[in-house]
Image (cartoon, grey):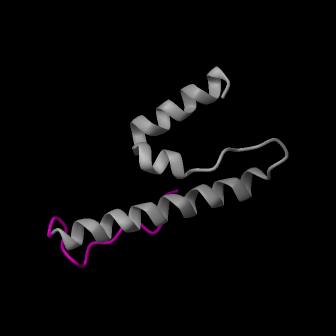
Amino acid sequence: MISREQAGFDNLKRNLGTDLASSIPKLRPGMDEDEYRAKVREVCREVAGRWSDHFVKQGKLPAKSRAPQSME
């Protein structure tokens, strides 16, 4: 990674946690930015849903609580 990419990844890890930050694919030259944003949202929703399910099973969240459907 170049220094700018490393700084961005470090910010993601700090704000989202290592698991979620590591799950997000890298934006590559030539990729459509709208498609990239949609893919990142999909990954975030998937991970947030797993965390929500985990916390419900541990009794730390009520069963009716779910991960946000829109992370925009």
Is 53 located above or below residue 17 in the figure?
Answer: below
Residue at 63% x, 24% y is: 4
Is 53 located above or below residue 10 in the figure?
Answer: below
Pick whichever, 51 or 32, lies toward us: 51
Question: How far from the left and from the top, in percent, is residue 14?
Answer: 40, 35
Residue at 80% x, 50% y is: 31
Q: Quadrant of the N terminus?
A: top right
Residue at 82% x, 41% y is: 29
Residue at 64% x, 60% y is: 38
Pick whichever, 65 or 16, lies toward us: 16
Q: Is 59 left, or right, of 27 in this rendering?
A: left
Quarter of the image where one finds residue 56: bottom left
Q: Residue furthest right?
A: 30
Is 69 located above or below residue 15 in the figure?
Answer: below
Question: How far from the left and from the top, in percent, is residue 11?
Answer: 48, 32
Q: Is residue 65 magenta?
A: yes
Question: How far from the left and from the top, in percent, is residue 5?
Answer: 63, 29
Q: Which residues are magenta?
A: 59-72
Q: Is 24 left, or right, of 58 in this rendering?
A: right
Q: Residue furthest top?
A: 3
Question: How far from the left and from the top, in percent, is residue 52?
Answer: 31, 66
Q: Residue furthest left?
A: 59
Magenta-highlighted stretch: main secondary structure?
A: loop
Number of numbered discs on residues:
0
Q: Is residue 26 magenta?
A: no
